[in-house]
Amino acid sequence: MNIVEPSIDEYLNKTLPVGDALLREMQRYGESCEFPMVGPQVGRLLYVLARSIGATRVLELGSGFGYSAMWFARALGANGRIVLTERSKENAKQARGYFQRARLLDHVQIEVGNALDIIGQLPGLFDVIFNDVDKPQYPCILDLARPKLRLGGLFISDNMLWHGTVLDKSRKADVRGVKELTRALLAAPDFVTTILPVRDGVAVALKIA
Ligand SMILES: C[S@@+](CC[C@H](N)C(=O)[O-])C[C@H]1O[C@@H](n2cnc3c(N)ncnc32)[C@H](O)[C@@H]1O
């Protein structure tokens, strides 16, 4: 199911800037191998959200070859730092290459392994935590992210409408994962959450307590 009416989606893709030359190259690469990445509409949303709270520390859970992380990196400014987590060595190596070309290697830390294990080992608090891991893992993410996010920080999750399957009664682990995280976020007294129907649905949760 299309979340956004295709002609509107096409309009947005034509109208919104798609980023600088490197971001466009990364987009073309991702599209050429059908890599599941956030794309320019969500990328721009991540950029706006990060800048709007003056974020300087971002943690990504599930970074792929670095496309969404590059949008964040563009938003963070001179003192910014982003931690990428990715279980595939090959994807992580590609991400490193792109950040090297962007001359931003000093601003990134690339961790290879399971983001769910890595998150607890990272020191300090983050301004933004972006969740894009496998959907069956979504239910445990909030409890792992909560203690690592500063007050006033944003917990952002991609694919929260999961191609419309949230409407199904499906017991599949990915659908259940997305719905369980949605329920947990909306029930959490320490977050105020909305879901934007951008691309495949993006949940934005502000930590208020
Ligand atoms: C949907 S892709 C998105 C990549 C990136 N966020 C983007 O939009 O450019 C998800 C990535 O997360 C990785 N991944 C999924 N679950 C993970 C986990 N538990 N720990 C680390 N990486 C994970 C996958 O290997 C994949 O590269």
Image: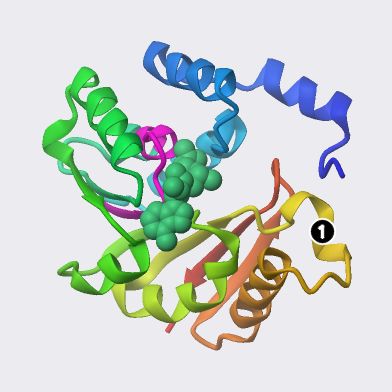
**Residue 140 pos. (x, y %):** 49, 78
Left or right, residue 117 beside residue 13? left
For label 1, the crowd category at 10 Å Cα-Cα, with few meaning under 14, some 14 to 19 and many 20 or more, is some
Residue at (24%, 21%) from the top-left corner? 102
Report which quarter residue 39 is drawn in. top right
Residue at image point 59% right, 62% down? 135
Q: Helix or strand or loop: what does disc 1 sit on?
A: helix
- Confirm whether residue 90 shows in the render: yes
The stretch in magenta equals 57-71
Q: Position of residue 9 (x, y in %)?
A: 78, 29
Nearer to me, 152 or 119:
119
In this rendering, would 78 be left or right of 9? left
Front in this rendered view, residue 145 or 50: 145
Quarter of the image holding residue 128? bottom left
Query: Looking at the image, which residue sits at the far top?
Result: 21
Q: Position of residue 79 (x, y in %)?
A: 15, 43
Image check: 31 left or right of 144? Answer: right
Give the residue number, with chain letter if any, for mark 1.
Answer: 165
Q: Is residue 46 above or below residue 151?
A: above
**Residue 182 x, y percent position in the rendering:** 66, 73
> At 67% across and 59% down in the image, what residue appears?
160
Relative height, residue 206 to residue 197 (above, below)? below
